[in-house]
Image (cartoon, helix red, strand yellow):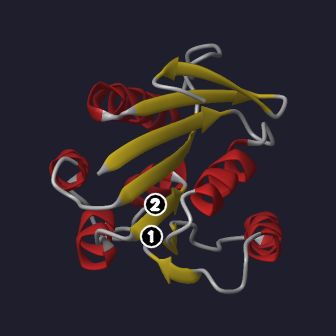
Amino acid sequence: MSISLVLGGARSGKSRYAENLAKAAAQTVVYVATAEVRDEAIQARVELHQADRPEYWQTVESPLQLAETLKRHASENTTLLVDCLTMWITNLLCAEEAVDIKGETQDFLEALATLPGEIILVSNEVGMGIIPMGSLTRDYVDTAGRLHQDIAHIADHVVLVVAGLPMAFKGKA
């Protein structure tokens, strides 16, 4: 088992880097898409990501119950590529029905620690700017920051991608 956390800003090249990691693993790849299409901008991003990944990868949509999806698809000779965790957090925070975000993230972290195969997690690094004024945005940044720290603690590799260049913080790039 190996866990890689790939962080970066919007359009930093983090998804491309993660996709290249998945290709290099030379295993079956399950691409776990967390986006919920809510507007034309998200639709355009989804289409861009779909066009960039190989057709032979299996795609599974998992906007909310990520831990269950990972448990269902993880196996020894499989690479799970999750893109992206901050979209998943957005879905949890903006769900029509109340979601136990702490419970969902805890379930996710507990699942990560036990899953077989390769796990590649993509997420936006959102904690490098000014502190947001609104409570929803603050909750988003705080939840993402805590989740990233918790994942980094158990991950084998943590990489920050800036301008398409990976910088390894843990393990190798």
Q: How far apart, in angstroms, are the residues tagged by discs 1 and 2? A: 6 Å
Seen from the viewer's position, the closer of residues 73 and 62 is: 73
In-image side of 23 versus 76 (left or right) = right
In-image side of 59 versus 3 (left or right) = right
Residue 45 place in picture, x, y as percent: 78, 64
Q: Which residue in the protein does label 1 denote?
A: 63
Seen from the viewer's position, the closer of residues 28 and 44 is: 28
Q: Residue at x 49, y 78 (%)?
A: 61
Residue 54 place in picture, x, y as percent: 73, 77
Tell me if label 1 and label 2 are in contact, CB under 8 Å.
yes
Residue 91 place in picture, x, y as percent: 46, 60
Q: Residue at x 54, y 58 (%)?
A: 25
In-image side of 114 versus 139 (left or right) = left
Corner quadrant of residue 41: bottom right
- Mark 1 or mark 2: name the one nearer the start of the chain: 1
Q: Which residue in the protein does label 2 denote?
A: 91
Q: How many labels does the image show?
A: 2
**Of labels 1 and 2, the one closer to you:** 1
Categorize mark 2 by other alpha carbons within 10 Å: few (<14), some (14-19), many (20+). Answer: some
Instruction: Give the secondary structure at mark 2.
Output: helix
Seen from the viewer's position, the closer of residues 31 and 89 is: 31
